Image (tube, helix red, strand yellow):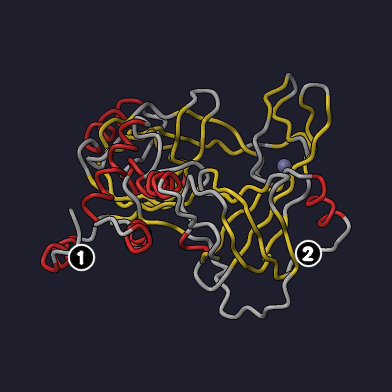
């Protein structure tokens, strides 16, 4: 269950004087109106705004941020800065910058669109290790986005126990959002034929097949390694998603002899209906215009754990 949602509900209820049932009805109605495109937390934010409640003035912890929030204020330490990128839109050149901001609860990617903010990075006025306060930003998916109405202020506050590890959220498939690392228990309901591609043995980058052989952009002509990728459809009862599983993980699912299409067919069949714990990154596949799940680890479902959770009764299984 979304504990953030619970916290939000409590806060809105306290400030508005509405009881929880009333509030939840409003939130559900808002979600229904937006055809489920918004999370419960996002809908709660919208309802709060409509009730004239400003939740945005308080500073939030990073683990309290949810997609759809506006007027986000946070304090954190920059733990990683990505190179500033340039792009052209409508014949005008633009820049975008991003970094990872951490506090003692979590970390989050922050994206800057305003040239004044980007200048702070390019001039080195803020850098890795800087503690900054962000004011009036908004959440787009799971990222904090800053526009020209947002502010970045350097802060003298000292932050301790910063969470630097990549945050993997345990989620239901229906709650997957782009650009987040997630872990989910799901059944394999479809499995497609393996596809093969070739990588450079040095850098593991893709190589191009040219007349004289395989060529890596960096290492030139190489004897490539053949790699397989299999697409699966996963279902956890709340939704389905296409998952992409690369070479090294296929063995965990029982795939062997990928070159033998007969054997692979058997293996694909026996995979159907099996349940696993998948970890990976959710991303937006621009070509199909849908979410896909790039799997980075697969674990078998631990039956003992499932049973003990059932006994505790604190999880919907
Ligand atoms: Zn290479």
Is 82 on the left or on the right of 10, as rendered? right
Which SS class for mark 2?
Answer: loop
Q: Residues within 10 Å of mark 1 (few under 14, many from 20)?
A: few
**Disc number lying in front (2 or 1):** 2
Q: In this view, does 267 lie to the left or right of 149?
A: left
Mark carried by residue 305: 1
Q: Closer to the camera, 243 or 56?
A: 56
Q: How crowded is mark 2: few (under 14 residues within 10 Å), some or many (20 or more)?
A: some
Q: Which residue is drawn at 55% across and 70% down?
A: 163
**Residue positioned most to the left:** 311
Image position of 119 with respect to 268: above or below: below
Quarter of the view holding residue 175 = top left
Q: Position of residue 279 (x, y in %)?
A: 41, 52
> Which residue in the protein does label 2 denote?
127
Percent x, y of residue 282? 47, 43
Q: How many marks?
A: 2
**Ligand 1: does it lie within 8 Å of the C-beta at label 2?**
no
Question: In which image quadrant can residue 8 be found?
Answer: bottom left
Task: Say whether residue 11 is left or right of residue 107.
Answer: left
| Pointer 2 or 1: first along the chain | 2
């Amino acid at each position: 269950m979304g504990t953030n949602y619970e916290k939000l509900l409590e806060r809105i209820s306290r400030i508005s004087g509405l009881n929880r049932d009333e509030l939840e009805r409003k939130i559900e109605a808002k979600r229904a109106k937006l055809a489920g495109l918004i999370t419960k937390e996002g809908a709660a934010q919208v309802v709060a705004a409509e009730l004239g409640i400003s939740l945005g003035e308080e500073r939030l912890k990073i683990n309290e941020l949810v997609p759809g929030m506006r007027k986000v204020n946070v304090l954190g330490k920059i733990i990683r800065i990505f190179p500033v990128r340039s792009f052209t839109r409508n014949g005008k050149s633009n820049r975008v910058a991003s970094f990872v901001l951490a506090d003692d609860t979590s970390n989050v990617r922050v994206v800057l669109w305003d040239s004044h903010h980007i200048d702070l990075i390019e001039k080195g006025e803020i850098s890795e290790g800087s503690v900054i306060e962000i004011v009036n930003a908004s959440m787009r998916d799971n990222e904090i986005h800053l526009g020209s109405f947002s502010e970045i202020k350097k802060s003298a506050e000292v932050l301790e126990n910063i969470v630097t590890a990549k945050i993997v959220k345990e989620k239901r498939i229906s709650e997957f959002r782009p650009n987040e690392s997630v872990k989910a228990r799901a059944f394999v309901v479809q499995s497609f034929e393996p596809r093969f591609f070739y990588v450079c043995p040095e850098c593991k980058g893709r190589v191009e097949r040219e007349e004289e052989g395989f060529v890596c952009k960096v290492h030139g002509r190489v004897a490539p390694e053949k790699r397989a990728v299999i697409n699966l459809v996963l279902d956890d009862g709340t939704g389905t998603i296409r998952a992409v599983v690369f070479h090294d993980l296929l063995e965990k699912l029982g795939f062997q002899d990928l070159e033998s299409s007969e054997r692979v067919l058997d293996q694909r069949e026996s995979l159907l209906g099996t349940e696993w714990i998948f970890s990976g990154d959710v991303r937006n596949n621009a070509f199909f215009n849908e979410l896909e799940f790039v799997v980075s680890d697969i674990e078998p479902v631990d039956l003992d754990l499932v049973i003990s959770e059932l006994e505790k009764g604190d999880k919907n299984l």
